[in-house]
Image (spheres, helix red, strand yellow):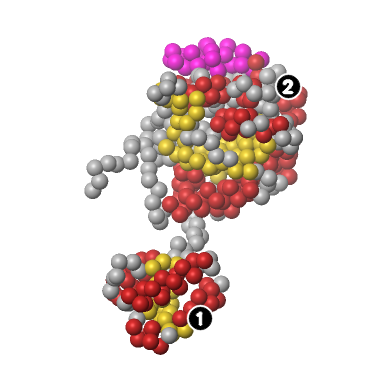
Amino acid sequence: MSTFKAPKGTYDLIPPDSAKYLAVREAIAAPLRGSGYGYIETPGFENVELFARGVGESTDIVTKEMYAFETKGGDRLALRPEGTASVLRAALEANLHKAGNLPVKLWYSGSYYRYERPQKGRYRHFSQVGAEAIGAEDPALDAELIILADQAYRSLGLQDFRILLNSLGDKECRPVYRAALQDFLRGLDLDEDTLRRAEINPLRVLDDKRESVQKQLTGAPLLRDYLCDACKAYHEEVRELITAAGVAFEDDPKLVRGLDYYTRTTFEFVHDGLGSQSAVGGGGRYDGLSEMIGGPALPSVGWALGVDRTVLALEAEGVELELPATTSVFAVPLGEEARRVLFAKVTELRKNGVAADFSYGNKGLKAAMKAANRSGARYALVLGERDLAEGVVQLKDMESGEQTAVGVNEIVAELESRLG
């Protein structure tokens, strides 16, 4: 037993379960790659101010959950708690918005960090795949991203998720709603921290998960009743485009999301089989974020889908992913000359795209065949001294148990034929 364990609230991905996570990441990324999104990768830590300005100083993420630290040189950094601010920072720094082809469409995959009370579906280290479309204000972009996320989940076999949709208005109509909501909240019996939050960003109070707060929010003014004509028309077009694509959604006038930068379209993917941690992903439009972090006006929209939560959702539905075999062929040499010959054949198989493994450590036949069984290989190659003298190798079908002798020089072609 090792002296060390994974830190509290984190996890290790190890075979065979890690294959599920890889498959989920690939399934989420596939529709993006086919829709003009290019891959971006940003550092695991950024300047603290990037998140304070972008995510919002009043959010729990910034006030309570960020892993912030000071470097030996005196820089204040934080492990990234989310992906959007980092991706937008990188796009601005590289001047991607000046290349003359807007929107800039990017996707990413990585680990994120928040100091929270660990529970199932909520970890201090978690994995997301995200997408951002930067530099264009177009309802079709909002609809595209929602449709692509739906497509990704459907391709995995998920059925029991719901899409919640709302509009948060813009700088024209939201201030009027903000004032009305603040007036309402001031009349409630709220604790000091919540009242302070109501003065800084009252929409965040709507996102409070405590039952004592939610009970008091009955009758709170709804943003949809305060939307200006431009925001109403924009939101209606998003709804129409999603509907025309055959994607079902639910209007949720109380949907806020936990980050300050959202404007207009906001959405969430929820799965009722996950209990209290029901959100598997979400996103929305963030037209003012670029200016918040010192860039030009760049209306943008994006989402992030949780890999961990998606795996839990698949398990809740009993969905078994069809995962490719890690090993198709397992080679068992008996003797030094057989080791040399079979190792060369394994190398050749791998070069030809066949997943192949080898019995290392000079195991005997019994132990080597046990290893072949554990590998999940469809075929085993067994080569002994008599086989060498005859120029053949024994090809064993691990499912049927059938064994045939195949010429050493024909074995690669034979396996390629059998495995398709």
Q: Is residue 181 magenta?
A: yes
Label 1: element kind: helix
Quadrant of the rendered image containing residue 162? top right
- Give the residues in magenta: 176-201
Q: Which amino acid type corresponds to the residue marked 2 in the rendered image?
A: Cys
- Judged from the image, the secondary structure of the residue bearing numbered disc 2 is loop
Q: Is residue 294 magenta?
A: no
- Looking at marks 2 and 1 on the same chain, the residue that comes earlier in the sequence is marked by 2
Q: Which residue is mark 2?
A: 228
What residue is pinned by disc 1? 410
Q: Say which quarter of the image contains residue 178.
A: top right
Q: Is residue 111 left or right of residue 5?
A: right
Residue at x 54%, y 68% (from the top left corner)? 352
Q: Nearer the viewer, residue 46 or 419?
A: 46
The prevailing secondary structure element of the residues shown in magenta is helix
At 66% from the left edge and 26% from the top edge, which residue is drawn? Answer: 287
Measured as percent of width and height from the top left, residue 210 is found at 44, 26
